Image (cartoon, rainbow, N blue to C red):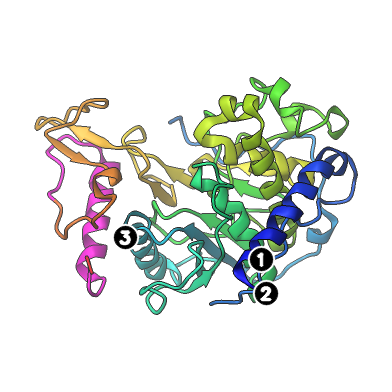
Amino acid sequence: MGCSNFFYTLLITFSVALITYNIIISANAPLKQGFPGPGNPSATSSPRLFSVDPIIQMPLDRSKATSGKRLFHTAVTASDSVYNTWQCRIMYYWFKKFKNGPNSEMGGFTRILHSGKPDKFMNEIPTFVAQPLPDGMDQGYIVLNRPWAFVQWLQNADIKEDYILMAEPDHIIVKPIPNLSTDGLGAAFPFFYIEPKKFESVLRKFFPEQKGPITNIDPIGNSPVIVGKASLKKISSTWMNISLAMKKDPEADKAFGWVLEMYAYAVSSALHGVGNILYKDFMIQPPWDTEVGKKFIIHYTYGCDYDLKGKLTYGKIGEWRFDKRSYDTVAPPQNLPLPPAGVPESVVTLVKMVNEATANIPNWGA
């Protein structure tokens, strides 16, 4: 089928999905795929163990007993931009370092590249090429390509593991990760800015009252999350449809802004009765989190700015800084200067790990 016919089919299918959307989510059956896959099989607070929502439906397809290791497949969605690519290279370097470490249940790894075409790093990083949304459908919010890319990958890839860890390019694994999910629940990091109760009136457009209390929606995004593969296959198309529907809804778009897709995943997980362990020790986010401790991932989403005395100058460019946004068109150089004395362990560890990766990844900066 030609490219134009393919996009036309996508648009027609999407229109039908939206028209039937409100009816579908009220039913007990899972949402049907909004878009058919293209058939491309290319390759802050004190620590607490976890808390569980007491009102939960255990998915029957995940209740069977397992023995031995419960391996999970790590999946990272990315564009082919310089910005995403250097982050993925560093992320994969540390994945390989810890994959076979003590207590690890880390299985395979896939970069889900939603640029629609292979890039020059296919041989360095295991990669599945997904098609992007048709031009204009993301309305300038490129993150909408993430759920669509997951739908394609789950439909077409041969995934050996029974669980999936959804991660992001700006994640650095700092120790071997066990399978944190249990008893039919996913394991997810709770974000303080995901507040379902605060936005109940908006969320009820997508999570009807007959589906249960708004507290069924966990304060999570799609990443980091470890979830059963069978559950994610059900969630992914709903996640895609709700992301697109929220972006098209002016009230939801205004309320959720840059975290819209995160709300869409949380809603979709709740619609399919997949609850989550809220695992605060999953990751840290420097500079606000200052110690690595028992955490498994460093998420360097925020800029780290300090004066030469080691004092945080957030909101003002520091005399010393590390901010991933400084490297949107070029990869960071090797041997970044370490922070001054007094800067927290988390930031020092982050920069040291970036430096080790860039010193050992072949053809860095190419």
Instruction: Point out the tag, 1 or 3, that comes first from the N-terminus.
Output: 1
Numbered disc in front, either 2 or 3: 2
Residue at the extreme left of the image, as rendered: 308
Residue furthest bottom in the image? 123
The answer to whether residue 36 is magenta is: no
Task: Reply above or below: 170 against 6.
Answer: above
Task: Identify which residue, 252 or 342, lies in the foreground.
Answer: 252
Q: What SS does tag 1 mark?
A: helix
The answer to whether residue 160 shows anywhere in this view is no
Give the number of the disc on residue 135. none
Q: Which residue is found at the position 16% from the left and 31% from the top?
A: 318
What range is drawn magenta here?
A: 337-364
Q: Which mark is residue 86?
A: 3
Q: Name the residue tied to disc 2.
A: 1
**Between 275 and 151, which is closer to the camera in this rendering?**
151
Instruction: Say whether residue 341 is left or right of residue 350.
Output: left
